[in-house]
Image (spheres, rainbow, N blue to C red):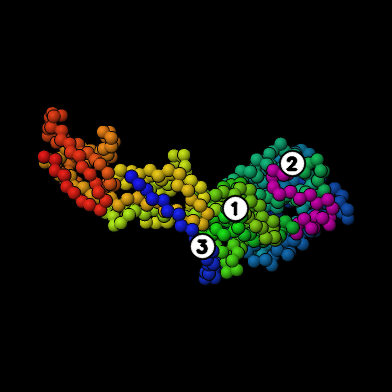
Amino acid sequence: MKIKLILIVFLTAPSLLFSQPRQKEQPVLTRILFLFDASQSMYGQWQTGSKIEIAKKLLSEMVDSLRYIDNVEMALHVYGHLKQYPPQDCDDNRLEVPFEKDNAEKIKRKLSSLQPKGTTPIAASLEACASDFPDLSSRNIIILITDGIEECKGDPCAVSYELQKKGIMLKPFVIGLGINKDYTKTFDCVGTFYNAANEKSFRTVLSIVISQALNSTTAQVNLLDIYGKPSETNVNMTFYDRFSGILRYNFIHTINSRGNPDTLRIDPAYSYRMVVHTIPPVTKDSIRLSPGNHTIIAVDAPQGELLLKYDGVSEYKKLHAIIRKSADNATLHVQEFNTTEKYIVGKYDLEVLSIPRITVKDVKISQSHTTTVQIPQPGMITIITTSPGYGSIYAEEKNTLTWVYNLDENSVSQTLVLQPGSYRVIHRPKNSTESSYTVEKSFKIVSGNSSNISLY
């Protein structure tokens, strides 16, 4: 059986896509929870005053500036301020000002009244913060401000990990107030850590953290062909939070009016795993965006096309082929005949779901080319029996029979669409009690022709 493979070269460049302006997206509510250290160590001197007074002053200024930003709500959770140390109380934390609109003055008043007393239960406080957020519909952010490390044998890293996995909050921002360099690594697993060495740097770090918490940034995905040019387009890209696995964005890749990949606005607070839904899909892991900067994400996604067709006019209603990577048994795609699909360049095996099935090995898909797989036009056969029974059709070649199709045991007339070739039908009526009543006949199928066989 001859199968035609035809290679067609696209000589035109990828066309530019012009689309209607996108509807303005509804801004996402950002909830910022300040987790504030008011343990005894915050009485320590730090340049112009005590750490507690400097931290209260600068945080109050930041809260004052945030009150005028739309779609932002704030809350204040404090630890180490309720119980005097000693004795040590590792449950010493409380939500002092819950999330609500226009609560900046409440937060400032509470900050001004804080008096350090107790210990540093960071893990327990982080865990308690989970119930401070009203829901998961907003961007939930924790900013931890502390001058010390965990003192209650808790595991802040494990708590932070679980809360992020559940999607309750983003990776926390941790601002250390002159923390010993030997301790800074203990916060790397908790969140994005900044160590403010002095009062001036604390002001700068707090501004940087707030900027990252509030601002999205821009990115561009270059889908590269085999020549390293960003010419591939019109495919969906899914961005997952790499840490929690939560789906964050879907964008159908677009080449804009200037011939460049379109600019995307993406939250820089996450690390992403991106899946480009080509066939087969292409994945890019550990994508990090620099807040305020334009990030270019390059992915190798070279594609060509596969066209499936058959000769002449066909009796097939819907004929499909299973597409697999060469030497791989996993089904990659099921493509209908008389359609064209894009695939990543490489070699593929095809199993055409005709009767009998046709296998085509090592079909090569090349960059910006269309490879055509063309099968012969089928013929038709009508098989008539005296009574319902058991039977099958076999392909006949060199005195060898290969099973092709089982007949309907409850029917006396069946019409089938078969590929050209030599066949044999074998049948025995149901009401026969002896194998000697088996009947068989050989027949040929010619492309475009119809014929009948009577098994009498």
Of marks 1 and 3, which one's residue comes earlier in the chain? 3
| The residue stretch that appears in magenta | 187-207
142 left or right of 347?
Answer: right
Q: Which mark is residue 136?
A: none
The image shows a total of numbered marks equal to 3
Question: Residue visible at 25% across and 49% down?
Answer: 446
Q: Label 2 sits on what residue type?
A: Thr
Percent across and percent down for residue 316 are 29, 53
Percent across and percent down for residue 53 are 82, 55
Closest to the camera, between mark 3 and mark 2, is 3
Real-space CA distance between mark 1 and mark 3, rounded to the nearest whole angstrom: 23 Å
Percent across and percent down for residue 386 are 11, 41
Residue with the mark numbered 2: 186
Residue with the mark numbered 1: 299
Question: Residue visible at 71% across and 40% down?
Answer: 90
Quadrant in which the N terminus is drawn:
top left
Closest to the camera, between mark 1 and mark 3, is 3
